[in-house]
Amino acid sequence: MIDLFILETCPYCKKVMEYMDGHNIKYRKINIADEASEESLIKIGGKRQVPFMVDHDRNIQMYESSDIIEYAKTLL
């Protein structure tokens, strides 16, 4: 399962979500507008930056929308 930490107003997050939705890549959206989700992001990733992706099945974590999209291409 892929978790994607986002903020709804973030254009980079929208870019990643549009790519993943357009290619039917399943993910769980976690909005860091929620304080508990923000704390979880910082605990896992070390900083408050979105988008942040966690692929639990492959034990991969990454920031940066372009990197996330390139990784998502490998899932197709």
Image (cartoon, helix red, strand yellow):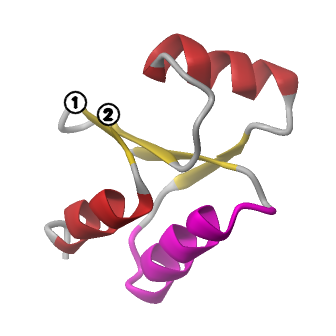
Magenta-tinted stretch? 9-25
- Determine the residue positioned at 34% across, 58% down: 68
Check the picture and name the quadrant holding the C terminus: bottom left
Q: Main secondary structure of the magenta part?
A: helix
Task: Find numbered disc 2 in the image and state the secondary structure of the residue it sits on.
Answer: loop
Image location of residue 62, percent across then percent down? 33, 41
Task: Find numbered disc 1 in the image and state the secondary structure of the residue it sits on.
Answer: loop
Image location of residue 32, percent across then percent down? 75, 37
- Determine the residue positioned at 21% across, 74% down: 73
Image location of residue 51, percent across then percent down? 54, 50
| Numbered circle sitting on residue 41 | none
For label 1, the crowd category at 10 Å Cα-Cα, with few meaning under 14, some 14 to 19 and many 20 or more, is few
Whole-angstrom CA distance, mark 2 to mark 1, is 5 Å
| Left or right of residue 74: residue 16 | right
Q: Are marks 2 and 1 in contact (CB under 8 Å)?
A: yes
Q: Label 1 amino acid?
A: Asn
- Determine the residue positioned at 72% across, 26% down: 38
Residue 39 drawn above or below residue 21: above
Check the picture and name the quadrant holding the N terminus: top left
Q: How many marks?
A: 2
Image location of residue 64, percent across then percent down? 40, 52
Q: Residue furthest top?
A: 43
Residue 24 drawn above or below residue 28: below
Which of the pair 58/19 is nearer the observer? 19
Q: Quadrant of residue 33?
A: top right
Q: Label 2 amino acid?
A: His
Q: Would residue 67 be counted in the magenta stretch?
A: no
Q: Would residue 23 be counted in the magenta stretch?
A: yes
| Numbered circle sitting on residue 56 | 2
Residue placed under numbered mark 1 in the picture: 59
Q: Quadrant of residue 40?
A: top right
Q: Quadrant of residue 75?
A: bottom left
